[in-house]
Image (tube, helix red, strand yellow):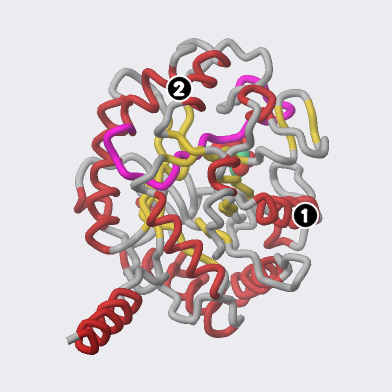
């Protein structure tokens, strides 16, 4: 009998291992697969806090080693760090937000050492007109860069530069550092050249599929998790209208900024949809960008953001940057900010997770 029980136990263990969630890229590196699995697991433990460009600059400072506006306020770093690669595609030395790409490389490595999570956005220039990501003067941009299009080779060059950057993200021992890559975001709006009114559903999906296939199969890149990230939406159907497929996406996310009194309800509705879909499709669910009027509503952190997201099992909420040169745009707290006391409450709430707690979870193992 004992023999049978042991066999049964072995079988059950093997079976449950076989069912462990895996990233869409079946060749994902070990560390990337661990990050995916652990991020999913962590969703039921708490909501990670993220901040865009937390490391390179903050309110009134740039490149101060170890500094972070978030840490200046609550004593801990964010768990998730957002980075921006716009202008890398042109071979520039620094991003559209004036951060040197070698600083981003170094920073990503530091975050990995700290045990935090890196996520990358890409406001890439318009490859047809050579304008910015916000140049919506032509509806032909997406079709022009797909295979057979007149600007396909330009886009290939963009991707080659992106690939070289991704492949340079290595730890001291040569391990490729897993990152969440979030291109073509807010496509349910029409302010970027890849937006809703600027390309067809088919072309948007084809853009995603071409990009991921090229990076994975031609460039042999297997340390990325891919995030699909809309702007505000009302229904599941609307959310999924341009979804390129479970075989290339790992994270279901949305961006939502507080622009008025309906924010809490809208945030709740969007969070409910992505957490439900994430559960059904075994994908990470997150709020990939957020921001509120924290200077005016000094209790925004607990009374608006946390209040709305508390009921859900989401991976993280990332608030946008604190530009060193545009104080009116600061979405994170900083030393002396009127919302600091409330941010400390938000930090101390058992629901939120910051760097120290995440480091203890060893998410890359
Ligand atoms: C936007 C603004 C811009 C910035 C861009 C890319 O939301 O913050 O100033 O250049 O993101 O980070």
Q: Locate residue 131, reporting x and y percent.
A: 62, 51
Q: In the picture shown, does residue 8 fall above or below 121?
A: below
Tell me the quadrant of the picture where the C terminus can be found: bottom right
Sequence order check: which comes first, mark 2 or mark 1? 1
Write down the residue under mark 1: 106
Res. 346 mark: none
Q: Locate residue 128, reporting x and y percent.
A: 58, 62
Write down the residue under mark 2: 301
Q: Locate residue 305, reporting x and y percent.
A: 39, 27
Lateral position of residue 32 relative to residue 205, left or right:
right
**Which residue lies most toward the front here?**
2
Q: Is residue 189 visible?
A: no
Q: Which segment did they paint magenta?
A: 310-329
- Check disc 1: other Cα within 10 Å, few if <14, some if 14-19, many if 20+: some
The image quadrant of residue 9 is: bottom left
Say which residue appears at 64% left-offset and 57% top-offset: 130
Q: Is residue 287 visible?
A: yes
Residue 75 lies within the magenta run: no
Helix, strand or loop at disc 1?
Answer: helix
The secondary structure making up most of the magenta span is loop
Say which residue appears at 59% left-offset and 82% top-offset: 220
Residue 323 lies within the magenta run: yes
Tell me the quadrant of the picture where the N terminus can be found: bottom left
Say which residue appears at 22% left-offset and 41% top-offset: 234
């Amino acid at each position: 009998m004992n023999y049978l029980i042991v066999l049964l136990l072995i079988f059950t263990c093997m079976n449950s291992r076989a069912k462990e969630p895996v990233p869409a890229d079946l060749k994902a590196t070990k560390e990337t697969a661990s990050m995916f699995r652990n991020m999913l697991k962590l969703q039921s433990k708490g909501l990670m806090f993220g901040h865009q460009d937390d490391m390179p600059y903050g309110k009134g400072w740039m490149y101060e080693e170890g500094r972070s506006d978030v840490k200046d306020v609550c004593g801990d770093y964010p768990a998730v760090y957002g980075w921006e690669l716009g202008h890398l595609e042109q071979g520039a030395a620094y991003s559209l937000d004036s951060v040197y790409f070698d600083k981003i490389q170094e920073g990503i490595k530091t975050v990995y050492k700290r045990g935090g999570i890196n996520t990358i956005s890409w406001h890439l220039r318009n490859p047809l007109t050579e304008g910015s990501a916000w140049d919506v003067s032509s509806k032909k941009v997406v079709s022009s860069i797909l295979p057979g299009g007149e600007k396909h080779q330009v886009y290939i060059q963009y991707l080659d530069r992106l690939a070289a950057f991704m492949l340079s993200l290595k730890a001291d021992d040569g391990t490729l550092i897993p990152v969440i890559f979030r291109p073509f975001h807010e496509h349910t709006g029409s302010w970027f050249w890849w937006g809703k009114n600027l390309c067809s559903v088919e072309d948007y999906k084809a853009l995603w599929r071409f990009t991921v296939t090229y990076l994975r199969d031609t460039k042999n890149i297997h340390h990325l998790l891919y995030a699909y990230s809309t702007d505000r939406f009302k229904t599941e159907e609307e959310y999924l209208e341009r979804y390129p497929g479970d075989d290339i996406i790992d994270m279901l996310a949305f961006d939502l900024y507080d622009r008025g009194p309906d924010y809490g309800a809208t945030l709740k509705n969007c969070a409910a949809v992505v957490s439900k879909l994430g559960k059904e499709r075994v994908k990470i669910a997150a709020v990939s960008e957020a921001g509120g009027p924290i200077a005016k509503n000094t209790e925004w952190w607990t009374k608006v953001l946390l209040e709305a997201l508390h009921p859900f099992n989401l991976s993280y909420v990332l608030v946008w940057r604190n530009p060193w040169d545009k104080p009116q745009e600061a979405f994170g707290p900083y030393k002396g900010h009127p919302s600091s006391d409330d941010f400390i409450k938000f930090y101390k709430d058992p629901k939120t997770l910051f760097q120290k707690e995440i480091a203890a979870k060893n998410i890359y193992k």
